[in-house]
Image (tube, helix red, strand yellow):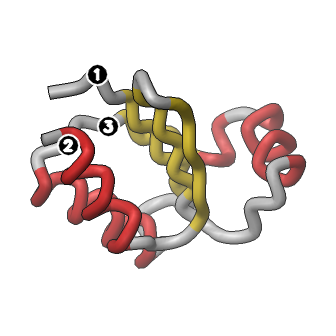
Amino acid sequence: MPELTVTVYTAGTSCQPCRMTLRHLDRLGIAYTAIPIDSDDAIREAAIELGMKTAPIVCVATPAGEDQWDGYRPDKLDALAAEAA
């Protein structure tokens, strides 16, 4: 299995897309680190610079490169699981 680092920046427990993303990753057996977006001003500023407009913000690093997206994206999560297999 290729090395995979997944970080999910969340907007708290009331964020439905955040909860759905974390549950989807759990279901797929993909390890991740969840960090509240509001835990650091630099995180918020970086998200804005990347053009991210909605939570969660998912950042993935693999040997093949990096990817990031915002919102609940089951298509991206499923593709990530296929790549990790």
Q: Quadrant of the N terminus?
A: top left
The CA distance from mark 3 to mark 2 is: 6 Å
Q: Residue furthest bottom?
A: 16
Q: Residues within 10 Å of mark 3 (few under 14, many from 20)?
A: some
On the image, the x and y values in percent for residue 2 come to 24, 25
Which residue is depicted at the point 31% across and 51% down? Answer: 80
The CA distance from mark 2 to mark 1 is: 11 Å
Whether pointer 3 and pointer 2 mark residues with C-beta atoms closer than 8 Å, the reply is yes
On the image, the x and y values in percent for residue 74 come to 34, 73
Q: Secondary structure at mark 3?
A: loop
81 lies left or right of 50: left
Seen in the picture, residue 44 relative to 18 is either above or below; the reply is above
Q: Residues within 10 Å of mark 1 (few under 14, many from 20)?
A: few
Which residue bears the numbered disc 2? 30
Q: Which mark is residue 32?
A: 3
45 lies left or right of 70: right
Identified by mark 1, the residue type is: Glu
Q: Quadrant of the C terminus?
A: top left
Q: Secondary structure at mark 1?
A: loop
Q: Which mark is residue 3?
A: 1
Whether pointer 2 and pointer 1 mark residues with C-beta atoms closer than 8 Å, the reply is no
37 lies left or right of 79: right
On the image, the x and y values in percent for residue 25 come to 24, 54
On the image, the x and y values in percent for residue 23 come to 22, 63
The CA distance from mark 1 to mark 3 is: 12 Å
Which residue is depicted at the point 81% across and 32% down? Answer: 42
Q: How many marks?
A: 3
Residue 22, quarter of the rendered image:
bottom left
Which residue is depicted at the point 76% across and 49% down? Answer: 47
